[in-house]
Amino acid sequence: MLNRVVLVGRLTRDPELRYTPNGVAVANFTLAVNRTFSNQQGERDADFINCVVWRKPAENVANYLKKGSLAGVDGRIQTRSYDNNEGRRVFVTEIVADSVQFLEPRGASQGQGNDYFGGPPSGGNDFGNQQNPNQNRSSGGFNDDPFSNDGKPIDISDDDLPF
Amino acid sequence: MLNRVVLVGRLTRDPELRYTPNGVAVANFTLAVNRTFSNQQGERDADFINCVVWRKPAENVANYLKKGSLAGVDGRIQTRSYDNNEGRRVFVTEIVADSVQFLEPRGASQGQGNDYFGGPPSGGNDFGNQQNPNQNRSSGGFNDDPFSNDGKPIDISDDDLPF
Amino acid sequence: MLNRVVLVGRLTRDPELRYTPNGVAVANFTLAVNRTFSNQQGERDADFINCVVWRKPAENVANYLKKGSLAGVDGRIQTRSYDNNEGRRVFVTEIVADSVQFLEPRGASQGQGNDYFGGPPSGGNDFGNQQNPNQNRSSGGFNDDPFSNDGKPIDISDDDLPF
Amino acid sequence: MLNRVVLVGRLTRDPELRYTPNGVAVANFTLAVNRTFSNQQGERDADFINCVVWRKPAENVANYLKKGSLAGVDGRIQTRSYDNNEGRRVFVTEIVADSVQFLEPRGASQGQGNDYFGGPPSGGNDFGNQQNPNQNRSSGGFNDDPFSNDGKPIDISDDDLPF
DNA sequence: TTTT
DNA sequence: TTTT
């Protein structure tokens, strides 16, 4: 069923990288996502959202992100539970990231070249597991913008503004 | 910052409706969202995701959804904490729904008429807080489908299939 | 960079299935997504959104969805252009679906068993390309709901309701 | 019905700001969203996605974003049509943004203070129409991370790695 | 050219 | 503590 999450926020601390017994990489990190509205005290609260990422992107996260880095996450919500050392059942809600995007400007990672993110060897600012790069023949622009009416009087109506 | 969640799943039990001291409605419910892949044992696990919704849509949820109902949620992740009655700090991660969509077929709610959801007085199958119904003049369709080549030989290339 | 789309709507007509020269399946369909708000005339407009899906899920879409079917789509926006038979450049914006979910109730596809969707041989109501089924050990629930205060007076504040 | 889009990309040119006869602001801009995978030629294509935003956020977009700015968009897909000056029906697919987030680092807009975006008078790096700032009492962190096992041997299994 |  |  549908389960999709997209976040942009900052790492609250350096990511933690581990490996399973079989050598599969896992990285954990927490994203502080500032709310877009203020609370009663006029402050902007944040949500602190735990994220997990596996395999290659896990290593990229560990290598190129650190406390304070601005990052985007595309993933799904996962719930699980485990018994802690006091014999209590603990319930966990976290985001399993399909891909993590590094959103720091070039300077922040001393990269160079014409890519936003100078980091990973392979070039590119996105750490993803097998994506779905499907149909994309002649990637073109977009046109016929109804607003780009060349010199003719503008025609924007108010019809569509319900509140 | 960006924080967006979209879910489709089934209510694990009837929603709970309450009111704040000021009379504002809040509904809580949990969505079981079946995973789209199987685990090692060949079973489909589910994620159990707590949701909150406020005001009018809260009342609609309480009135038209029940245990087992299929529903869609569009919202954001919220984290909070509180001290429980043992003096322990409890951390909560939940979804604050901006809108909840009822996805049961008409029959399921004995509704009628030409709306999918026969429920709410106002008609419509969606419970939302103030949406952003912006520009939408002549709502039209889409056209010039590259695939609708009238009688001419099909032309789909394999260029775009990287794996 | 981030590019994520989630839709729930109804097919405007039967999906079209084709194959590339290399035998890769592609299905095209249009989703009518009713808006959640009414226009000036009190009517609910719809958006008509073109979707493409590749490989196995393409065949599932062709086999199990038809005009009017309620479906969910998780994908990304793609823009491309091509020259039509009048030598005009045509710009296309469409959704490339990573996965398509069949949201019709069981009866609608004469299925049976304890799966929501009785359709595909493999069982399951979701047609997806290689998903990212990562960490998901003991799938558990969620707990310590601040609202489940056992018999104690309810404590919901109005603090958080800014408008 | 569900219709949700989240994008992060760069403006292909300066945004265009206009006003309806009633004085409502509308801004148009196109986002270039680089794909996360390469094409057959080893290049990263981009999708060029037209966006519209209304009212106050429209003015913020016009004031604080320009060609090349990195921005996040949270919105919905809209389709419409109009007749162009050759009497042809043109179909448009675009994103109506509920909110636009400015993702440039502080320096890029000569701002200051402890907010990421020093721009808008009201402070804050997000331009949104009326959001849904609901329940958010004691915004706290997150804890009980199953991975933060203090000095005890790590326990990550491979159970969950299906491919 | 559109669905319920 | 979970839904079909």
Image (cartoon, coloured by chain):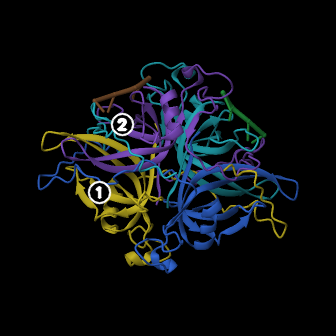
Chain colours: A blue, B cyan, C purple, D yellow, E brown, F green
Q: Residue at x 63, y 67 (%)?
A: A59
Q: Position of residue A109 (x, y in %)?
A: 51, 78
Q: Residue at x 63, y 55 (%)?
A: A95
Element at badge 1? strand
**Mark 2 sits on what residue?**
C48
Q: Residues under labels 2 and 1: Cα distance? A: 23 Å
Q: Position of residue D58 (x, y in %)?
A: 32, 58
Q: Residue at x 38, y 79 (%)?
A: D110
**Front in this rendered view, residue C105 or C100:** C100
Location of residue D147 by image quarter: bottom right
Q: Amino acid at mark 1?
A: Ala
Location of residue A84 by image quarter: bottom right
Q: Amino acid at mark 2?
A: Phe
Q: Position of residue A42 (x, y in %)?
A: 51, 64
Q: Is residue A38 above or below residue C91?
A: below
- Which label belongs to residue D83? none
Q: Is residue A116 above or below residue C134?
A: below
Q: Callout 1 environment at 10 Å: few (<14), some (14 to 19), or many (20+)?
A: many
Q: Is residue A79 visible?
A: yes
**Front in this rendered view, residue C158 or A56:** A56
**Front in this rendered view, residue C81 or D118:** C81
Left or right, residue B35 beside residue C54: right
Q: Say how many tags the image has.
A: 2
**Mark 1 sits on what residue?**
D27
Left or right, residue C103 beside residue D163: left
